Amino acid sequence: MIKEQIVKGKLNKFIKENTLMGQALITDPKNTVSNYISDLSKSNNLELNISSMDLYTI
Protein backbone atom coordinates (compact mmCIF):
# COMPACT_ATOMS: atom_id res chain seq x y z
CA MET A 1 0.00 0.00 0.00
CA ILE A 2 2.72 2.49 0.88
CA LYS A 3 4.60 1.66 -2.32
CA GLU A 4 1.45 2.30 -4.37
CA GLN A 5 0.97 5.70 -2.74
CA ILE A 6 4.61 6.63 -3.41
CA VAL A 7 4.31 5.58 -7.06
CA LYS A 8 1.04 7.51 -7.46
CA GLY A 9 2.59 10.61 -5.90
CA LYS A 10 5.67 10.46 -8.14
CA LEU A 11 3.55 9.84 -11.23
CA ASN A 12 1.24 12.76 -10.42
CA LYS A 13 4.25 15.01 -9.86
CA PHE A 14 5.76 13.94 -13.19
CA ILE A 15 2.51 14.61 -15.05
CA LYS A 16 2.08 17.98 -13.35
CA GLU A 17 5.59 19.09 -14.32
CA ASN A 18 5.69 17.64 -17.83
CA THR A 19 2.28 18.33 -19.34
CA LEU A 20 1.06 21.73 -20.46
CA MET A 21 -2.33 21.51 -18.79
CA GLY A 22 -0.80 20.52 -15.44
CA GLN A 23 1.86 23.20 -15.31
CA ALA A 24 1.59 26.26 -13.11
CA LEU A 25 1.00 29.63 -14.70
CA ILE A 26 3.95 32.00 -14.82
CA THR A 27 1.79 34.90 -13.67
CA ASP A 28 0.04 32.91 -10.90
CA PRO A 29 2.00 29.83 -9.75
CA LYS A 30 -0.90 28.68 -7.54
CA ASN A 31 -3.08 28.21 -10.63
CA THR A 32 -2.65 25.64 -13.43
CA VAL A 33 -3.05 26.15 -17.15
CA SER A 34 -6.04 23.82 -17.12
CA ASN A 35 -7.81 25.77 -14.38
CA TYR A 36 -7.03 29.08 -16.07
CA ILE A 37 -8.50 27.98 -19.41
CA SER A 38 -11.56 26.57 -17.65
CA ASP A 39 -12.12 29.79 -15.69
CA LEU A 40 -11.59 31.90 -18.81
CA SER A 41 -14.08 29.76 -20.74
CA LYS A 42 -16.73 30.06 -18.04
CA SER A 43 -16.31 33.80 -17.52
CA ASN A 44 -16.56 34.56 -21.26
CA ASN A 45 -19.15 31.89 -22.09
CA LEU A 46 -16.81 30.32 -24.64
CA GLU A 47 -15.46 26.86 -25.26
CA LEU A 48 -11.67 27.20 -25.35
CA ASN A 49 -9.34 24.36 -26.29
CA ILE A 50 -5.62 24.17 -26.99
CA SER A 51 -5.26 22.61 -30.41
CA SER A 52 -1.49 22.78 -30.79
CA MET A 53 1.63 23.88 -29.00
CA ASP A 54 5.16 24.74 -30.04
CA LEU A 55 8.09 24.34 -27.69
CA TYR A 56 11.09 26.59 -28.06
CA THR A 57 14.31 26.22 -26.14
CA ILE A 58 17.19 28.61 -25.93
Image (cartoon, grey):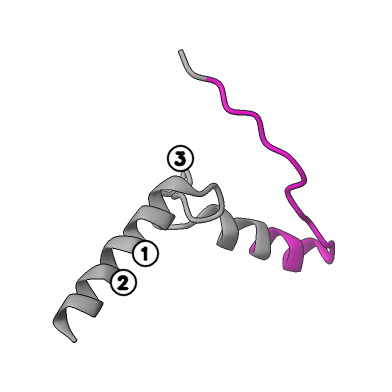
Residue type highlighted by circle 1: Asn
The residue carrying mark 1 is: 12
Q: Nearer the viewer, residue 28 or 55?
A: 55
Disc 2 to disc 1, how far (Cα)?
6 Å
- Number of other residues with Cα within 10 Å of mark 3, as a class: few under 14, some 14 to 19, many 20 or more: few
Instruction: Assess whether mark 1 and mark 2 are in contact (beta carbons under 8 angstroms).
Output: yes
Disc 2 to disc 3, how far (Cα)?
26 Å
Residue type highlighted by circle 2: Lys
Q: Going from the N terminus, do you reach mark 3 or mark 1 first?
A: 1
Q: Position of residue 46 (x, y in %)?
A: 84, 62
Please tell me in which quadrant of the rendered image residue 9 appears. bottom left
Which residue corresponds to the image point at 23% horizontal and 78% vertical from the top-left?
5
The residue carrying mark 3 is: 26
Q: Position of residue 56 (x, y in %)?
A: 55, 21
Q: Position of residue 49 (x, y in %)?
A: 76, 54
Q: Provide the residue span drawn in magenta.
A: 39-56
Q: Position of residue 57 (x, y in %)?
A: 49, 18
Q: Indicate the secondary structure of the residue bearing disc 2.
A: helix
- Check if residue 57 falls in the magenta segment: no
Q: Indicate the secondary structure of the residue bearing disc 1.
A: helix
Is residue 48 toward the left or the right of residue 30 in the image?
A: right
Q: Going from the N terminus, do you reach mark 2 or mark 3 first?
A: 2
